[in-house]
Amino acid sequence: MIARISGIIQQLLLIWLVLFSVVAYFWIDLAGVDSLDPFAATRPALGLMISLTMFCIGCLITVDEIDEVFRRWPTVLGGTRSSTRSCRCSRGAVALCWGSNASI
């Protein structure tokens, strides 16, 4: 039973995260300016919710995957470094496209 639920969560997690992100982004346009914004109302608990989400994602990782991270730690660190670098490049590209005057 737990394995089945875990499988469903693994398959649909990205879809739910993207769906809720889109709804949160367009909430004011969809519900109106005077409506209660549940995303803003939960801002004080955001740290707790992110921690809970990361814990749940961590519960989905198998022991074999954790062992693989420890075996290939230089590759993992290299991937983290390149990911950070690409995020900076993406941020700069978006700033240029939107005409931001901020330094990149």
Image (tube, rainbow, N blue to C red):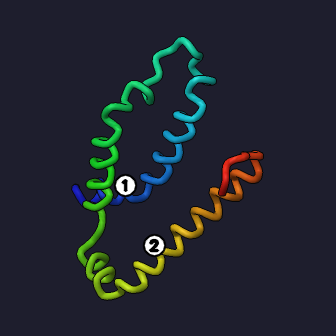
Give, as a three-letter code, the residue at label 1: Ile
The mark tally for this picture is 2
- The residue at 28%/83% (across/down) is 70
Residue 23's disc is none
The one nearer the camera, 53 or 19, is 53
Left of 35 or right of it: where is 93? right
Q: Which quarter of the rendering shows the N terminus?
A: bottom left
How far, Cα to Cα, is label 2 from label 1? 28 Å
Quadrant of the rendering where the C terminus is positioned = bottom right
Q: Are marks 2 and 1 in contact (CB under 8 Å)?
A: no
Q: Secondary structure at mark 2?
A: helix
Which percent across, then down, holds residue 85? 56, 69
Q: Secondary structure at mark 1?
A: helix
Lateral position of residue 52 relative to residue 72, left or right: left
Residue that mark 2 sits on: 80
Q: Quadrant of residue 3?
A: bottom left
Spot occupied by residue 15 in the image (x, y as percentages of width and height): 50, 50
Say which amino acid is labelled 2: Thr
Q: Is residue 26 left or right of residue 64?
A: right
Q: Quick one: label 2 or label 1, which is nearer the N terminus?
A: 1
Q: Give me the residue at 63% from left, 24% from top.
A: 29
Q: Residue at x 58, y 16 (%)?
A: 33
Q: Position of residue 92 (x, y in %)?
A: 67, 58
Give the residue pinned by disc 1: 8
Out of 91 and 21, give the one closest to the viewer: 91
Q: Residue furthest front?
A: 103
